[in-house]
């Protein structure tokens, strides 16, 4: 199940191997800095290969949660070792993206320079002005108008990746919500802290998670929907671990669509599409593809759901130069033969980035496919 183990065949990169290394590190007093330095460096190398996909936490027979103890190991390691520049850049990505959007040409031009600090193929911020497009379509942002009607409103909780790198997708979701008779709203963007958790910056993650959880609690009573699976699912997974409580529920798009499926107009146009789901989504929401299949069947579209593992990008992991070779190998093993053909859809932002990088193919999110079908009728344009 572990993508890095499948790509390398190295038992140190299996859940069992990593667990054994960390167990010995703990026995040696690793958190207090008493572990033998060469061995501790070997543990670090093994954990650096973890993509934090969380497959081990659910699919492993003994449910070894490598991403969780990896984060705690990195926190202890970096108390005594300097963090690389790439680590600092990724940690500040979420809070700096609103500024980067305003300085879009500078941010996009600086992409090639990222190789200096060990990053490559960073996504670019598109020219689309989301605020202007939301205003043009009469879609309100929370805090700028009267409180929405809980009976009709559906609030989109934006994540950093789709909000700034794929704003058209957020707009597509808002238009789908409207087409189904509900009133779309967009919550103000706030960092989720997900990259902080992956980097082992747990104190900073807890602070960020607490702020975002409070913001979600202020929206209690409203239907909340997120787009990016890794971030949306973190509200009920990593947040619970860090804060001792779950944040208010934020639904994945297909979970909300399945709940209002009777509002989706029945279609008989036929056709087929292929769905590739995010690895974390497969792990934490194994029924997610079934929900999409119900939605597409309502439209009269047959949804094929080939089995895939991790695409090899895993958030920012594949953007680190040190992981480039293994990232490409994982994609070749699990995804390369699945992305060919018309109407191939992917739910993960990192998955769409990886398909573009490794195969030169621009995959769409199923929400964009749904938006096209719902608005094919001129009355909805």
Image (tube, rainbow, N blue to C red):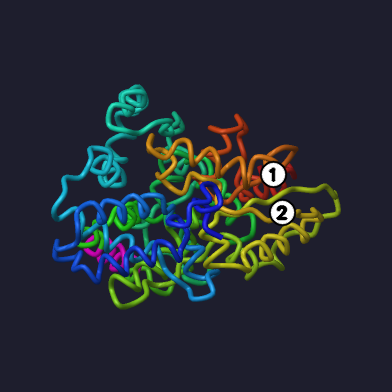
CA distance for labels 1 and 2: 7 Å
Image quadrant where one finds the N terminus: bottom right
Give the mark nearest the N terminus, 1 or 2. 2
Image quadrant where one finds the C terminus: top right
* 42 and 355: which is toward the camera: 42
Look at the picture and state if 101 lies above or below 62.
above
Please provide the residue range marked out in magenta: 206-216
- Name the residue located 79 percent from the left edge and 59 percent from the top edge: 266
Rendered location of residue 52, percent (x, y): 42, 57
* 284 and 170: which is toward the camera: 284
**Quadrant housing residue 163:** top left
- Name the residue located 26 percent from the left edge and 65 percent from the top edge: 25
Mark number for residue 338?
1
Check residue 210 for magenta coloring: yes
Picture mark count: 2
Rendered location of residue 274, percent (x, y): 72, 49
The residue singled out by tag 2 in the image is: 306
**Quadrant housing residue 337:** top right
- The answer to whether any part of residue 275 appears in the image is yes
Secondary-structure class at tag 1 = loop
Q: Is residue 340 left or right of residue 194?
A: right
Magenta span: predominant SS is helix
Rendered location of residue 329, percent (x, y): 55, 40
Look at the picture and state if 244 lies above or below 19.
below
* 296 and 371: which is toward the camera: 296
Rendered location of residue 326, percent (x, y): 48, 41
Q: CB of mark 1 within 8 Å of CB of mark 2?
A: yes
């Amino acid at each position: 199940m572990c993508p890095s183990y499948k790509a390398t065949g190295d038992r140190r990169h299996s859940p069992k191997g990593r667990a054994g290394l960390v167990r010995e590190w703990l026995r040696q007093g690793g958190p207090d800095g008493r572990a033998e330095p060469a061995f501790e460096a070997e543990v670090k190398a093994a954990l650096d290969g973890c993509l934090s996909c969380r497959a081990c936490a659910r699919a492993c027979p003994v449910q070894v949660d490598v991403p969780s103890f990896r984060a705690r190991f990195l926190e202890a390691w970096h108390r005594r070792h300097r963090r690389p520049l790439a680590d600092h850049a990724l940690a500040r990505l979420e809070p700096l993206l609103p500024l980067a959007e305003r300085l879009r040409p500078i941010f996009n031009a600086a992409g090639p320079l990222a190789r200096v600090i060990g990053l490559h193929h960073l996504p670019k911020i598109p020219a689309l002005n989301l605020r202007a497009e939301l205003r043009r379509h009469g879609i309100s942002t929370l805090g700028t108008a009267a409180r929405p009607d809980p009976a009709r409103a559906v609030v989109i909780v934006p994540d950093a990746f789709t909000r700034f790198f794929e704003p058209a997708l957020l707009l597509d979701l808002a238009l789908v919500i409207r087409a189904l008779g509900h009133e779309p709203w967009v919550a103000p963007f706030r960092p989720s802290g997900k990259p902080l958790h992956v980097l082992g910056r747990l104190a900073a993650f807890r602070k960020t998670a607490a702020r975002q959880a409070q913001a979600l609690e202020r929206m209690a009573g409203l239907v909340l929907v997120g787009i990016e699976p890794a971030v949306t699912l973190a509200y009920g997974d990593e947040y619970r671990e860090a804060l001792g409580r779950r944040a208010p529920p934020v639904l994945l798009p297909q979970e909300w669509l399945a709940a209002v499926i009777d509002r989706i107009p029945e279609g008989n146009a036929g056709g087929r599409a292929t769905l590739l789901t995010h690895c974390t989504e497969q792990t934490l929401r194994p029924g997610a593809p079934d929900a999409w299949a119900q939605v597409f069947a309502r439209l009269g579209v047959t949804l094929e759901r080939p089995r895939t593992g991790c695409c090899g990008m895993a958030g920012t992991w594949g953007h680190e130069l040190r992981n480039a070779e293994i990232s490409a190998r994982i994609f070749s093993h699990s995804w390369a033969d699945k992305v060919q053909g018309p109407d191939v859809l992917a739910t993960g932002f990192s998955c769409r980035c990886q398909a573009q990088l490794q195969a030169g193919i621009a995959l769409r999110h199923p929400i964009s496919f749904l938006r096209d079908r719902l608005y094919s009728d001129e009355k909805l344009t």
